[in-house]
Amino acid sequence: MTIDFRQCPVMGELGSVSRVSGSWRQRAILLFEVGVWAMICLLVVYETRRNPDRWELIGGLVVTTVSLASARAFPLLSLTAAAASSLAVLPNYLGRFPVWPILLMLVAGYLAGRRMEQAKPAVLSFAGIALAGLPFAYFIGEDVVGSWLSLVATLLFAIFVPWHLGRYLRLRENLARTGWERAERLENEQRVAAEQAKLRERARIATDMHDSLGHELSLIALRAGALEVSAHLGERDRAAAGELRESAATATDRLHEIIGVLRADDEGAPVRPAGEAISELVDRATASGMAVAQEVEPFDGVPPMVELAARRVVQEGLTNAAKHAPGAAVWVGVRQSAGVTEVSLVNDPPPAGPLPGLASGGWGLTGLRERVRLLGGTLHAGPSERGGFEISARLPHEAPAAHDRAGSTTDSARQLATQRRQLRLTLINAVVLPVGVLIAMFAISAAYYLINMFGSVLVPGDYDRMRIGQPRAELEPVLPGQQRLERPDVAEPPTRQGAVCEYYGTDAGLLGTSGDVYRLCFERGELVSKDLLLNRPGEDNE
């Protein structure tokens, strides 16, 4: 006896409670996102109240609104907008570090990680924002490399790590869900195996009845017929023999009916001709009201079992489409290649949305998957790219040996292994990539400052020969190609208003520098002052 739990009142109430709980959960998430949007907008207004430029206020409100409004439907756009807010940390706010971009990136990065299926678009978005920040840092800041590295570090820890956290949690939930689905599929397969064992036993009983009782009844009818035409019996005895023959024939017919009942499978009596072609199957579905398009190649030289399996794939797909996606368009394709028959059936999403409370037990697909596996083929069944459902099978004309098929990995096992591998990679990337980026940033910074340290040294002899009033063009040959980034934290001597000062190092070695800096100030292309800024407390500067 099979119990349909969907018809059980208690299970129906539990399903209603589950749907109500899911609805409240969605509302809670929406309220949370709205609350975060309001909080970040208030923070933007508060932090920019003393900024005379309105670009930070307007840009912050726009980026926050776009990022959080698109977080549910367009997570990649939300992630890109939040990552673009990291450019707000580059300008000089007179000692103020903006906090609102950090908070926005933390929230948007986590939400995008929870909702994005692919990792490549997110990585490309991070790389694009980081590269766009380099010219931005060049135009608005003095320390280009330092500002850009701070931007990369902000992207790394404020949005990249939260995105990996959200992705890790989503993959872990998918892994758990995949495990439960695999357990449920195994249970269904066990039920199917049990039903198949029952059917095989019923078929054995039917065979036994046919071989024993059918044979005996046939002998009885044969002997009764011989007595009916015997000349040694009277009319009364021959009439009795005729009645005995008719009773035996009737019993034989009843036996065939009983055998037909015992041999009937769980799908009931046959509803189609045994030799019906796929095109005829599609025509019958079209006549019943389904919108079916087909591209079916003829079966030339295809083994009968492969042709039968192809018909079963199409039949199961049409049955599922009629049951779960009424009114949706269906496409059926059968293609022949070198030794392989490929069958595919794709249906669009149902126009009225998924039917409530109608779930598939997986029996038809489980049996179909076993049929395809026994032929050495593969079967894929799952959501299509357009939101509908797709069933595709690859049926080789020459099946491999039985021991090769016995050890094949199931689709659920492969899916579970894929989820585990993605989970491990996400966890590794969340740890390894930030550390690797930090090491790379440290190496770039060290190389940049090392090059600056040696490339900004002004030879003391050249400095001594410089005279006030010399044109800068005369000093150009002895001036280094770049200025010293690090300067001593000392009070600088006053210079003429409107003069532009340049800073050059006095020395450089493998162990570092003394920190002393030459300051040369120019006005209208002429040297107006030259000073030595000492990095040693207690000594006066020139």
Image (spheres, helix red, strand yellow):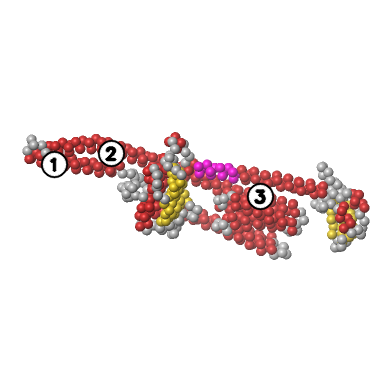
* Residue found 13% across the figure and 41% down from its top: 242
Instruction: Give the percent coordinates (x, y) of residue 130.
Output: 67, 53
Please give the residue where the numbered disc 3 appears in the rendered image: 157
| Left or right placement of residue 32 versus residue 497 in this view | left
Find the magenta span and give its range.
414-427
Quote the CA–CA distance across marks 3 and 1: 96 Å
* Residue found 36% across the figure and 40% down from its top: 196
- Contact between marks 3 and 2 (CB within 8 A): the answer is no
Q: Nearer the viewer, mark 3 or mark 1?
A: 1
Residue 186 part of the magenta-drawn span? no
Please give the residue where the numbered disc 2 appears in the rendered image: 206
* Residue found 66% across the figure and 55% down from its top: 129
Quote the CA–CA distance across marks 2 and 1: 27 Å
**Which is more toward the observer, 2 or 401?**
401
**Which is more toward the observer, 399 or 364?**
399
Q: Nearer the viewer, mark 3 or mark 2?
A: 2
Q: Secondary structure at mark 2?
A: helix
Badge 1 crowding class, 10 Å Cα cut-off, few under 14, some 14 to 19, many 20 or more, is: some
Instruction: Give the percent coordinates (x, y) of residue 321.
Output: 41, 53
Badge 3 crowding class, 10 Å Cα cut-off, few under 14, some 14 to 19, many 20 or more, is: some
| Left or right placement of residue 521 versus residue 311 in this view | right
**Which is more toward the observer, 267 or 333?**
333
Mark found first going from the N terminus, 3 or 1: 3
- Three-letter amino acid code at disc 2? Ala
Mark found first going from the N terminus, 3 or 2: 3
Principal secondary structure, stretch drawn in magenta: helix
- Three-letter amino acid code at disc 3? Phe
Label at residue 243: 1
